[in-house]
Amino acid sequence: MAVSQLVGAKIHRREDPRLITGHGRFTDDLPHQGLLHMVVVRSPYAHARIRSIGVEAAKKAPGVVAVYTAADFKDVIAGPATFVVAPVFAPIKLTNPPRYPIAAKEVCYQGEPVAVVIAEQRGQAADGAQLIDIDYEPLPAVMDLEEAVKPGSPKVHTDQPDNICWDATYVPWDKTDEAFKTADVVVKERIVQQRLSPNPMESRVVLAEYDSFDKRLTMWMSTQNPHWIRLFVAGALGMGEHAVRVVSHDVGGGFGSKISPYPEDFLVPASAKLLSRPVKYTETRTEAMQNAYAGRGQLYDVEVAAKKDGTLLGMRVTQMLDAGAYMALFSAFQTNTCLMAGGAYHWNAISSRSQGVLTNKIPTDPYRGAGRPEATHLVERMMDLLAVELNMDPVELRRKNFIRKEEFPYTQNFGLVIDSGDYEKAMDKALKMVGYEELRKKQKEQRKQGKLVGIGLSTWIELCGLGPGAATGPATGGVVLSESAQVKIHPAGGISIYVGTHNHGQGNDTTHAQIAADTLGVPMDLIDIRHGDTNEGPGFGYGTYGSRSLAVGGIAILRACGKVIDKGKKIAAHLLEAAEEDVVFDHGKFHVKGAPDKSKALGEVAFAAYGQLPSGMEQGLEAVSYFEPPNFVWPFGTHICVVEVDPETGAVDMQKYVAVDDCGNIVNPMIVAGQLHGGIAQGIAQALFEEMVYDEESGQLKTATFLDYPMLTANEMPLIQLDSTVTPSPTNEMGVKGIGEAGTIAASAAVINAICDALSPLGIKHVDMPASPDRLWEQMRRARAASNGNGKEARR
Amino acid sequence: MKHKVATTVNGHRQEHEVEPRLLLVHYLRDVVGLTGTHIGCDTSQCGACTILVDGKAVKSCTMFAVQAEGKKLTTIEGMAKDGELHPLQQAFWDEHGLQCGYCTPGFIMAAAYLLEQNPNPTEDEIRRGLEGNLCRCTGYVNIVKSVQSAAKAMGGAKTKAQPAVTAGGE
């Protein structure tokens, strides 16, 4: 790599000018002639049999062009039904109900499509949808995970054998017998990860146009991975991928919810094909909250065995994962919690088991962090519970058990190799920033005054940069999550770079250009970064999720640039009349070793590349690279949160939030900070506010608008102070790791640990999320009542 | 039955016949063709559709198009003048006040009204002033900073800067 000029600098984002002036190209903003609008008629029941569907009145409504039900799509959306919407990445597959994009006989979650109405105007389609007459026979809704797995439970799908999606034991319980037999202390806890609505501010939009003469399909849509969508849609519609183009320009946030395909991704192009007219579907917020693949939705039973001096011995983890009514593309990915449960610490042994459970709810799928926030939350909660049990400072307990920096690369209990780390350094920096010793002293005084003040730590680690084939292959049914890039240097020196990742807020168009500009030694302005169009660039792109756009996608760019430089050397050798091995490339120029004054600039070489070359040498200066990382990358850090809980109301006042994170070498510190801010905000929001609430009897979603689902506003967000340590990753040549999910992975544990610490004088050990005022008030009331019942004075 | 509506949008007179049920936001996006004003919810919570109506910030999903008769409307497309960004737009760019950019037009319009009313807001006043707008990407940290920096650029110089928020500090 050339001497760095741009990498590491705060470079303003090149994607911003259009977004701040109202010229973004979000799918719903695109002008289109002759467009029809689709409205989806959805099941109001969580579980019901469809007796009949009456469509005649709707068909006659003003402006309505077509009304379709499952029967109408049967010849257009073919292919194996499981491939249509649910390719399954499960460790051990037991029950995987087939999913068709529109229900024919039975609806299994509230919001499942039953019919579509297509009209000249969106309002007319909505009016027409009101006239669809469906006769349902309601069936029992399966909502509770523990009830769902019992023999004799009502079934989520009446034609399936049971409700157990998968059941996988990674390490059996007898492997931890010794740890628990020899332990001085054992702590146990049940930890709930509530369901979350992902809520990117832009709901999903799908627009499809079918050219019936050329038999080509073009889709514009809001997705994190257009190539995956092309693969699934082409397969389902029986078309070759060469005839399907998926375009995804600006996307208003994803957070994981725009990875997997959705029913409308098939219903819209199929309708466009049936009608030979362009069709658009624009999701409403309520539809998004009912139908976007939900985050988390897990239940953990955890036990930890330790010695009196705090040495960790063993852990046992059982995960019950609420898969919802069908398996989504990556729902089984979230079993990674079972492999990451040991966190940043040494353990003699860990046993873990995951059960995926079907329920009559929208499926769950990755949401920012996907399995890793859950792992951090459970291990960091257990560390604090153990610290209370041992009457030990939580900092000292962590320090005693940390994997030490000289031990990396470190093979953890499940065989994953943690590539790098220096956990103590990050923790010590955070302790200093927050003034830990002082805070603890002050806390003693405050407690005497009856104040409920707490300090919480989260010494988090993360596996990201998805991912090495050896690790992802078995979990994904053979799919390797590498990444592609194509670099084209045009004759006059302009450079187009096509990437397989996507950009929906991460700033990749800027950071990727920084990397390429440094590598090729040219100004950034000469480089155009292109993403989100399957008709451009390499044959396949894997998309953006799992904090992979830099650590995997960035390296693909670096390597494609390297290939171009190698080709350039051959051409430069010809121009300089030198041997190829004597030519070096430095700061955008080729010259003969030791003679830098006689050189050829990259632009000159590019021009020559398209002209006459010695025989045997091909024209052109372009290259494609696919990068499959040899390992994951492993960021880490320490977050510390200070809270005060109001003893009367249960309201949480977040007084300080300090984060020291290590994502290896940094390409653009401004963007890294932005990713951390947003990630931490989502972690705090899970800890304090957010929860999808269903009626346990009927399966109705009760939090289907922003009125009912509390989104964090500027008013609730505390000031956060960031700093970093830099431990370069040995996994890639740039030494970079991911940072997109880190904040979310770390934050919830720091907040809840702080709240539990604050409430510990009342005898409260554990608090589940969201730690809303009413929940805390009720827990405090019970704790005081219990304490009074023992004849003691209620402490306040 | 359709109704006539005449407005001034970003200084240009607009006259159309619209259905009485048409929301102002749909009028701007679908009829006038200005798609910078976005829609993020159905219940007037998110503020993505915020515009200025006779200088006041209004969520344009809370008005029918016909109610805008005779009014002066300013949308995000009307903020830059003669190729020069509005100080708020410049500040959002400089301070990394946006990520996916979907909510950004609404935030800029709401902030424009906030600074109109209070050219020198405290950090707390900015946070409370922007409570009606939702962002899922930024945690609001750099949005608050952007508004502080714009206030300074526009002449209200006394806003206190936040403590340094950086990464890569080692």
Image: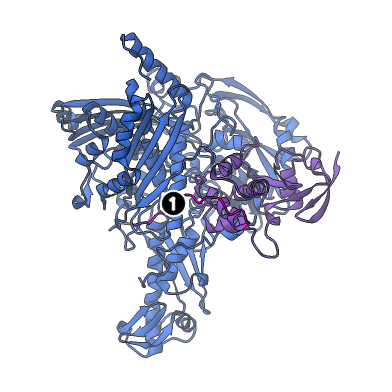
Which quadrant is home to the C terminus of chain A?
Answer: top left
Tell me if residue A87 comes above or below residue A512 in the rendering: above
Residue B162 covered by magenta stretch = yes
- In the figure, what tint was chain B given? purple
Q: A22 left or right of A733?
A: right
* Residue pictured at 46% horizontal, 51% vertical: A674
Nearer-the-camera pick, A210 or A732: A732
* Residue pictured at 50% horizontal, 22% vertical: A141
* Residue pictured at 67% horizontal, 41% vertical: A38
Colour style of the rendered protein structure: by chain
Disc 1: which residue: B165
Q: A607 left or right of B27?
A: left
Nearer-the-camera pick, A50 or B114: B114
* Residue pictured at 59% horizontal, 60% vertical: A17
Helix, strand or loop under label 1: loop
Spot occupied by residue B98 in the image (x, y as percentages of width and height):
54, 52
